Image: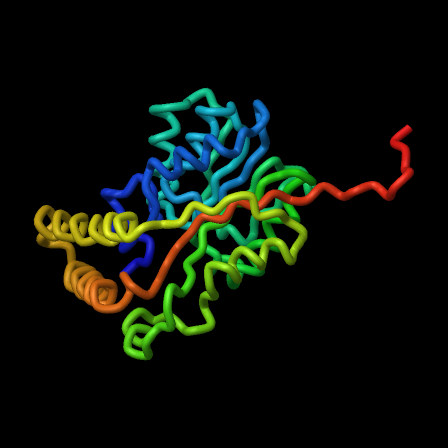
């Protein structure tokens, strides 16, 4: 079945399409303290909640990028209902193809929970860092291993051991690339349970209300398999966090004057 139809079905109950809660998203927005009319991009923006909140809080201007036509349509509806005059647009495209008009020009660049777009955490950081000005924000959401994953879990989840690192290596990757780690917002088991459980709920509701959909068998099989893997292994094995990095401002050599 169509990949983006699958995620539309399974994420219909989600406001934030990641294993974090709205309260933690509120904390993230508050901590950013962006200037008014900050220029931002959110890659893999999902339903646009983060970007819309930036517009509401700071009159931020910019673009949300997502490859899913369903999520982009959802984001546009939410923007119209909540901040129709904001300088925000949503664009359906592959996030890896996005380039700002000028490099190192944005106040914030984010990719929260979709580093696969750029081929992993390190590549995601490098791509986002190239977009932001000195002192600008690089915000990423990334899984990490809480414990060594079992072979059974890797097989069931379709993940490879090398797909993710540790919480500390996720943080160090940003610092190694010229940013300062300012804060992390770590997901709890309750955050994970909500994220996973809402997918089961949404699927159950969809099956009940769309009994003639020819994709039902595949949807149910995929969700059932993922649920079993999560409950048996994933809940104790895979963590997730939002990492707040700030691009370092180059220091002038001692004795250098700006005059």
> Can residue 203 be seen here?
yes
- In the picture, measured across the screen, residue 62 lies left or right of residue 191, that is right
Q: In the image, residue 188 lies at what x, y percent?
A: 32, 50
Question: Which residue occupies the foreground of this view, 77 or 256?
Answer: 256
Q: In the image, residue 127 lies at what x, y percent?
A: 60, 53
When the figure is inspected, residue 181 is found, relative to residue 41, above or below; the finding is below
Q: In the image, residue 155 lies at what x, y percent?
A: 31, 76
> Can residue 103 be seen here?
no
Residue name at image x 47 percent, y 27 percent = 55
Is the N terminus in the top left, top right, bottom left or bottom right quadrant?
bottom left
Residue name at image x 38 percent, y 64 percent = 146
Q: How many marks?
A: 0
Residue name at image x 66 percent, y 38 percent = 135
Question: Which residue occupies the foreground of this view, 213 or 243?
Answer: 243
Q: Residue furthest top?
A: 85
- In the picture, measured across the screen, residue 61 lies left or right of residue 151, that is right
Question: Which residue occupies the foreground of this view, 212 or 33?
Answer: 33
Residue 75, located in which quarter of the rendered image?
top left
């Amino acid at each position: 079945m169509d990949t983006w139809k699958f995620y539309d079905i399974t994420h219909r109950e989600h406001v934030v399409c990641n294993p974090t809660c709205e309260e933690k998203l509120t904390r993230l927005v508050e901590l950013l303290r962006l200037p008014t009319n900050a220029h931002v991009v959110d890659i893999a923006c999902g339903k646009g909640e983060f970007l819309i909140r930036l517009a509401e809080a700071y009159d931020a201007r910019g673009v949300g990028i997502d490859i899913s036509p369903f999520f982009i349509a959802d984001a546009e509806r939410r923007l119209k209902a909540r901040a129709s005059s904001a300088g925000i647009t949503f664009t359906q495209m592959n996030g890896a193809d996005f380039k700002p008009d000028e490099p190192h020009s944005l106040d914030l660049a984010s990719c929260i929970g979709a580093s696969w777009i750029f081929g992993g955490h390190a590549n995601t950081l490098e791509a986002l860092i190239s977009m932001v000005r000195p002192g600008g924000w690089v915000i990423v959401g990334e899984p990490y291993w809480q414990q060594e994953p079992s072979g059974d879990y890797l097989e069931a989840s379709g993940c490879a051991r090398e797909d993710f690192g540790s919480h500390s290596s996720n943080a160090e990757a940003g610092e190694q690339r010229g940013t300062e780690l300012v804060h992390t917002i770590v997901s709890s088991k309750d955050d994970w349970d909500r994220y996973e459980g809402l997918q089961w709920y949404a699927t159950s509701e969809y099956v009940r209300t769309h009994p003639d959909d020819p994709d039902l068998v595949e949807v149910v099989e995929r969700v059932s398999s993922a649920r079993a893997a999560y409950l048996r292994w994933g809940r104790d094995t895979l963590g997730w966090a939002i990492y707040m990095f700030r691009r370092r401002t180059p220091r002038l050599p001692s004795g250098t004057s700006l005059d």
